Amino acid sequence: MNPLREAALVETRRHFFGRAAGGIGTAALGSLLNPQLFAAPSSAALTESSVGLRGIPHFAPKAKRVIYLFMSGAPSQLDMWDYKPKMNEWFDKDLPDSIRNGQRITTMTSGQERFPIAPSTFKFSRHGKEGVWISELLPHTAEIVDDLAVIKTVNTEAINHDPAITYIQTGSQLPGRPSTGAWLSYGLGSMNENLPSFVVLHSTVNGGFGGQALYARLWGAGFLSTRHQGVSLRSTGDPVLYLSNPEGMSDNMRRRMLDELAAMNRRRYAEVGDPEIQSRIAQYEMAYRMQTSVPELTDITDEPQHVLDMYGPEVKKPGTFAANCLLARRLAERGVRFTQVFIRQWDQHGNLPNDIRRQCGIVDQPCAALINDLKQRGMLEDTLVIWGGEFGRTIYCQGGLTKTNYGRDHHPRCYTKWMAGGGIRPGIVYGETDDFSYNVVDKPVHIHDLNATILHCLGIDHERLTYRHQGRDFRLTDVHGNVVHDLLV
């Protein structure tokens, strides 16, 4: 908007009360006298600050922070976690109608004449005290399985990538809601004045990203203040755009400029009362402090060699999954509340055996290293680590099927995630699927249940962390969700 026109449209109090004499003006005045009709915290007793909302956490938390390792594109539970040896006898036989039971499938396979069973080509063996079945694809993760709670029955209604990833990140398949990290920033506030409370890291694969696109709304603040949205760190150049002072500008000049800008914004706030102006002031100040904190964060020269070796050979390459896992630990050390690590290219509709071997080779060692690193520093007990994608993959093959090659379509009805630390019971397998890894037969965990459990670990009652918007209270779990207490210590 043209700033001169915008200034001309600002109403004085006299103008406002003059217009309020009319019917529409009277209604507007009435709504202002009842602010709960508009966007506002659900309880007037709750006040937002750098330490979050008054009264939160609702009870003693087990976790202070979260690291979410998100495998975008949906890794195959059948080839990694959900061992189904009986399927070897079903090779190239059709999926029984009684198993599918008319359930929705994607347009990518709905036109197939057959749905032939594709058993996993990978060997499974038992690991840990409980003898958890794990694929040969994950030898490093197998070594830390006693620290994990493996959930085999996560399920969702979404069957395509964008609504599915939006659903699990924000609690709704429709865009526009706050992401999990934004909810935590809003409710719990920040633990570090020099870094954002919510940071997003994007991992490269073979020097690029590829795979399903990831949109900023997945780590956005929705209808919350923009101060709660995730801040993406870049792997090349400045970790945050425009973080460095341009040529010719000194630190003193930058400080004076920000002071003058803040004064102008405060005057504007006094005129129009837009809370986003306050958010803008806070974000400018955070950016100024990040000029010092972020370069220190991303400089890993102080890391001992044995720690670097633990994360694997790619740890020194900025933007790799290994480098981002190490960075996630450093962010956790510095009090960042929520760190989201994305890695794409798990959407394996064809050539799955080769592609999943590559992907597991990228993530297996860094995931295990992150758990071990947190554990040896005494941080795992109050850091919640989550691994998984937006849905799973089908037992039936998409495209051509051979003994050594196959593809798998999207499957939302059951898939595997794991959680560790931060109040999660270690060394367990939760839930069971049928012989085809197609339906849940015991202990389903809907993604609303998963999100309710995550919030519980942080001391939050998911039904009480709400925000009033457009005349109703919104929450991360919408109107659903139950805490899975069996997963908790």
Image: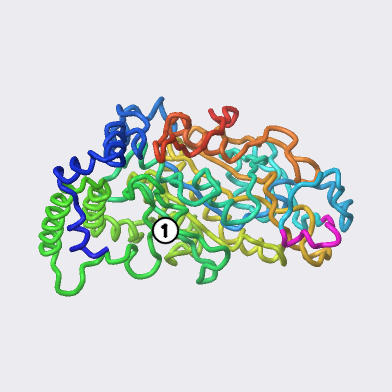
Which coloring applies here?
A: rainbow
- Which quadrant, please, contains the N terminus? bottom left
Q: Which residue is mark 1?
A: 305
Q: Is residue 140 left or right of residue 76?
A: left
Within the magenta stretch, is there residue 297? Answer: no
Residue 310 vs residue 152, the one in the foreground? 152
- The residue depicted at 30 percent of the width and 39 percent of the height is 23
- The residue depicted at 87 percent of the width and 48 percent of the height is 96
Q: Is residue 390 left or right of residue 280?
A: right
Count of numbered marks: 1
In this view, 344 is above or below 236: above
x and y percent of residue 333 in the render?
A: 36, 46
x and y percent of residue 80 in the render?
A: 68, 51
x and y percent of residue 179 in the render?
A: 45, 47
Is any part of residue 306 visible from this angle? no
Task: Tell me the magenta residue range.
Answer: 107-117
Residue 305 vs residue 292, the one in the foreground? 292
As drawn, the residue found furthest toward the top would be 59
Q: Quadrant of residue 264?
A: bottom left
Q: Is residue 386 left or right of residue 20?
A: right
- The residue depicted at 86 percent of the width and 59 percent of the height is 114
Is any part of residue 102 visible from this angle? yes
Magenta: main secondary structure: loop
In this view, 487 is above or below 436: above
Q: Is residue 266 left or right of residue 46?
A: left
- The residue depicted at 49 percent of the width and 46 percent of the height is 170
Within the magenta stretch, is there residue 116? Answer: yes
Residue 295 vs residue 274, the one in the foreground? 274
Residue 468 vs residue 45, the one in the foreground? 468
Bin the neighbour count of mark 1 within 10 Å (Cα to Cα): few under 14, some 14-19, many 20 and up: few
Amino acid beneath label 1 = Gln
x and y percent of residue 98 in the render?
A: 85, 43
